[in-house]
Image (cartoon, rainbow, N blue to C red):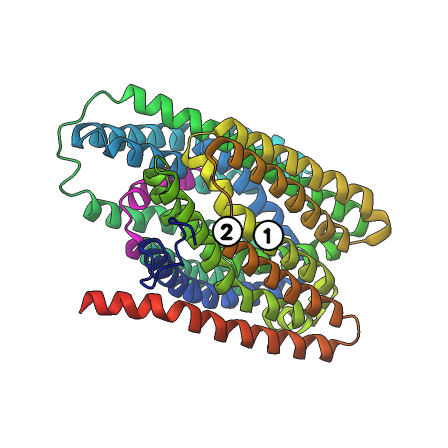
Amino acid sequence: MKAHDPVGSAVPSVSKLHTVRATSIIGGAAMGNIAFGLVRMKVAAVILGPVGIGTIGLLQNLLNTAASIGSLNLGVAGAREIVASESSGQRKSAAARRAVLLATFALAVGSGLAFWLFRSQLAVLLFQDRDRGSDVGWLALGVAAVAGAGYQTAVLSAGRRIGDIARLNLLTAAIAALVGSICIVRWKDGGILPFILAAPVATLTLGWFFVRRATSGLMQSRAGPIAPHIISAVKLGGALTTSIFVSLCGQLAIRTLVERKLGAVALGHFQAAWTVTTVYLAFIFQTMANDYLPRLTAALTDRNQAQGLVESQAEVGFLLAAPILLAMIGGAPFILSLLYTGEFVEATTLLRLQMLGDMVRLAIWPVTLVLLAGGASREYAVTDIVGTAILVAMAAVLLPSLGLASAGIAYIIMNVVVGAAVMLIVYRRYSVVLGGRATRTFALLAASCGTTFLLTFLSVTAGALAGIAAASLWAGWAIFHLRPATAFERTKAN
């Protein structure tokens, strides 16, 4: 056993302890988020149907795309800049926080105004209807809110305030579900805009309370020059924004292809499956962004520490995600009927394929974030852009013959190709790999998911039973495997 192996010693590693704790906090909040999201989307699906869900997807994607450009993703880049400056003293750390604050404020105002000015052109692009420009223009409020919330995300993530992040997300989900549901019930199609805007506006409003509490003593510190921090954060944020913008454009391109080739109902089915895959593993990816990335940034100068952190995060991610993946693959038609309506069962195959793609993504992401932690923004952006090109190209080629399933197959191919490239780049540049134990866990998970997927072709019942059985076994293994870490943490606390 190598000296840096995080699971080789009798005492659980600090990185695994922290990973389990952070994931449990974010995961607990995510369960609440999922419950509120279920109510919110169920109301929309029942009242608006597949066509309405497809419209929500188009507008949400437009908002996300514009907000990614307007915010320069300073929530992530700013957090890294603040963490990297902490080792240079309190003065530089204060300067980094103020730099992120000024940058996000300027971006919020500028991006919101720019979106509003081009509202008519965006309406033509999205709906081929210039008269809908006034409706699209309201999304400028959401764009500005997302950009402004970047400062809150950066400060809370850099301060490792996982509890505050979880509370903020939970409160935001509750408000979005309440306001969104009321608007859809009251105004039906006319309530789609407030349905979409409720979450970003609530996040910005509530976030300031948590940030003020987190920075009450820090912001009074005397700050150094802020220009170098703005340049550094904007440089990394620009690269992140480029990759995210291309990725969102790729998703928009696929949605457009689906609508034009298969119709508005198929677009609603696509949106339903995509939303499920996005929501139900979000807590793991969110934990990596909010907790794992700042810790990885601080640890990257020590190769052994960074390697242990990557392996611990990957292993915990596999164990926690496995029951969700297997239950979704096996019970996809029942889950779609429960979350939406029986009309959405047509998205069953797509949902299963996307879950297989997410399984691969879980293995890639802990290693991919090494590039961000090390400031290798160009390599990160290039691999992401190439991945999006593969996704759109494969979906376009396969769509005429395979229908909706083409998007899921393209998603798997993209993750496999990009994953191989990222693993190679990170190994050559930082000598960090996924790790032996994490790789073995992934191989077993892949075999379980693949077997369950194949059994679904025998019958719906066989697939569902296989998924439930496999999910139960993995849940038991996760509890048994992670129990020593949580028990050790409680012992230390006592």
The amino acid at mark 2 is Ile
Residue sitting at x 76%, y 55%: 405
Residue sitting at x 69%, y 46%: 255
Q: Quadrant of residue 480?
A: bottom left
Disc 2 designates what residue? 196
Q: In the displayed structure, would residue 202 be above or below residue 329? A: above
Q: Is residue 461 magenta?
A: no
Q: Find residue 424 and report its horizontal and vertical position in percent.
A: 58, 36
Q: Find residue 226 and report its horizontal and vertical position in percent.
A: 26, 22
Q: Secondary structure at mark 1?
A: helix
Type of secondary structure dominating the magenta stretch: helix
How far separated are the C-alphas under marks 2 and 1? 7 Å
Disc 1 designates what residue? 56
Q: Is residue 188 visible?
A: yes
The residues colored magenta run: 143-164
Identify the mark at residue 22; answer none if there is no mark.
none
Query: Label 1: few (<14), some or many (≥20) within 10 Å?
Result: many
Q: Is residue 43 visible?
A: no
Work out which residue is located at the far right of the displayed protein and give it.
401
Residue sitting at x 48%, y 47%: 366
Please tell me which of labels 2 and 1 falls first in the chain: 1
Q: Is residue 147 magenta?
A: yes
Q: Is residue 24 left or right of residue 246?
A: left
Q: Find residue 113 and report its horizontal and vertical position in percent.
A: 45, 29
The amino acid at mark 1 is Ile
Question: Quick one: quadrant of the N terminus?
Answer: bottom left
Q: Is residue 155 left or right of residue 467?
A: left
Which one is in front, 100 or 382? Answer: 382
Q: Secondary structure at mark 2?
A: helix
Query: Label 2: few (<14), some or many (≥20) within 10 Å?
Result: many
